[in-house]
Image (cartoon, grey):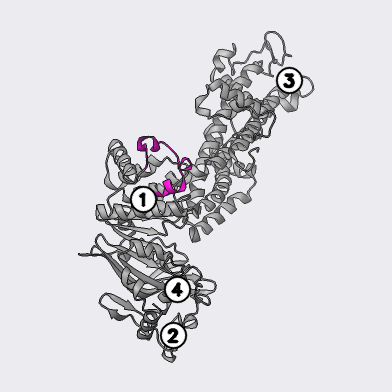
Amino acid sequence: MAANPAYDPALDAPAEKQPLATRLMYLVRKQPLGAAGAFIVLIMVLSAIFAPVLSPYDPTANDFAAMAEAPSGAHWLGTDQFGRDLLTRIVFGARTALVVGFASALVGGIIGLVLGVASAYFGGRFDLLFQRVMDVFMAFPLIIMALAVVSIFGTGVQNVIIAITIPFIPRCARVVRSSALALREIPYIDAARACGYSHTRIILRHMVPNVMAPFLIMITAFVGQAILLEASLSYLGLGVQEPTPAWGLMLQGGAEEYAESAPWIAIFPGLAITLAVFGFNLFGDAVRDVLDPKLRSQ
Amino acid sequence: MATLLEVDNLQTQFLTSAGIVKAVDGISYDVEEGETVAIVGESGCGKSVGALSIMRLIPWPPGRIIGGAVRFQGKDLVKLSDAEMRHVRGKEIGMVFQEPMTSLNPVLTIGLQITETVRHHLGVTQEEADKRAIELLGLVGISEPERRLKQYPHHLSGGMRQRVMIALALSCEPKLIIADEPTTALDVTIQAQILELMKGLTRRLGVALIVITHNLGVVARYADRVNVMYAGKIVERGRAHDIYHRPSHPYTLALLKSVPRMDQPRKAKLDPVEGQPPDLTRLDEGCSFRPRCRFKVEHCEREFPPLNSVAPGHVAACFETARVVRLEKVAS
């Protein structure tokens, strides 16, 4: 550290003594790509929250006087084949994407977290059996699994969340288990047992906080994946249904018929999906770099 | 004084691919209230397994207590349900582990780890638990206890962490503390401090202490009574003074001779215990120390010697006790 010519002692001082702005600047300088990702995510979150304020149009109102119009001063990104403002629909679509993304990543992640740690903690036959069940779930490709769930439960936002959550559980459980297995052998878990704590307490209070790093990395990656999955399912007609604004749905409506005459109908939602997934992936990579001691720079 | 803990013919085995390992093979000893009892032996002789068996912390699979009883204040701990056992652990019996660096959870504060135990067993409020934690940290000689409560284990040195572990073990006013090699991972000056602290506190608070160690110096100074273990069995038991001055089992004698002593000439050669400890999966009916023993007779092949009384309160598992004692007398 000291050998580094660009070393600035102010940056290495205890974080708690610095104002928030300084700490943020430090993170931006250390992880510029991650900061860019976080910025994209932040824009998305803000536009989802303030969607009604940001856009003057109703995302579901048809305007047959302005069908498939090119981008203009009135409609910045143009309109679709029903005359709905694309910018408005993309901004409102961010809501659907984020709700589905966060809900399924968090629910799937947390269930996977607890199951994975429990599996490692109990070990033996329970672990063996549980991991084989997880193997079965993992054997299905993500999208096939989600398709199966949607075809059982039907379409709609809630069912899309369930469909995306279920394939996430084994993936998270697997990663968390491998971290927890190493933890199981460390004496403080024995020490916790010697203090007379119950299994539940040891798992939730003593083991779960120790696997937070891989868990958070998984979660951020999951959100991006979930947004992509939701778009794919909606595009296939198995996800969110019209007239709810959703990016995948917008692609489905415009992509085939208007690809040549009004390409913006497909281009802008596609860009939104790309940008969102890109943002979450960048952010996730930065989180991993910060939290994973093996990748931490010297 | 009343008997607090009575270990009666305890047997713990491990099932491994190489066969059944009889890690603890029928040990019996007792601990009186407020007494310090040492369990001594070389690595792998079953002393830690014996202690973990008392707490029922042997992981199954592969380990299992297959017989015997552990009577603690009249209750047989081996027969308790898991829920009942959880009330004993931490509350009635505290435990101090070998590795202070890894015995505290790195993501929880010191205060939280102590108050969690206090609240869990005594059902007090967070404020009362905090007060108790500060009192405990003061008791084990940690400066600025209020500030330490908010610190994480990595802020503390090894010796300080072991003090925290002792505070944790004492937190619910247990009757007994089991210390499994409490000083092995510490450097020598800190070892003495920690041992003095444990001795002082247990005496003051009237807590009985089982010290598991391979350090005979620890035994001589801090223990009231000593159990010497070899290959899963207790081979000699007596008051610390008697064990030192009248070792009556060849193994104890060999152990004492293998340690450098201040009262011997500096040029005096050490006399190590020859050979290796036996493979615990293939013990026969004879004495397990016989391959390394200088006193062995034909009878040792056929039968494991029972614990014979050498003097009041002093027993040794050897047929040739008289010869061992005589030789020791000639030497000194």
Residue B181 percent coordinates (x, y): 42, 59
Instruction: Say which residue label 4 marks.
Output: B257
Quarter of the image that includes the N terminus of chain B: bottom left
- Report the chain holding disc 1: B
Q: Nearer the viewer, residue B302 or A52?
A: B302
Q: Position of residue B63 (x, y in %)?
A: 44, 67
Labels 1 and 4 share a subunit: yes
Q: The C terminus of chain B appears in which quarter of the rendering?
A: bottom left
Relative placement, left or right, of B157 versus A134 is left
Kind of residue at badge 1: Ile
Find disc 2 in the rendering and name its residue.
B295
Disc sitting over residue A264 in the figure: 3
If you read the primary sequence from the N terminus, does the residue marked by circle 2 or circle 4 appear first? Answer: 4
Whole-number angstrom distance, CA of label 2 to CA of label 3:
98 Å
Residue B44 place in picture, x, y as percent: 47, 69
Q: Secondary structure at mark 1?
A: helix
Label 2: few (<14), some (14–19) or many (≥20) C-alpha neighbours in 10 Å:
some
Amino acid beneath label 4? Lys
Q: CA distance from mark 1 to mark 3?
A: 70 Å
Q: Residue at x 57, y 32 (%)?
A: A101
Query: What amino acid is found at the position of numbered circle 3 in the picture?
Result: Trp
Q: Secondary structure at mark 3?
A: helix
Check disc 4: other Cα within 10 Å, few if <14, some if 14-19, many if 20+: some
Kindly report which numbered mark, 2 or 4, lies closer to the viewer in this rendering: 4
Vertical position of residue B90 compared to residue A63: above or below: below
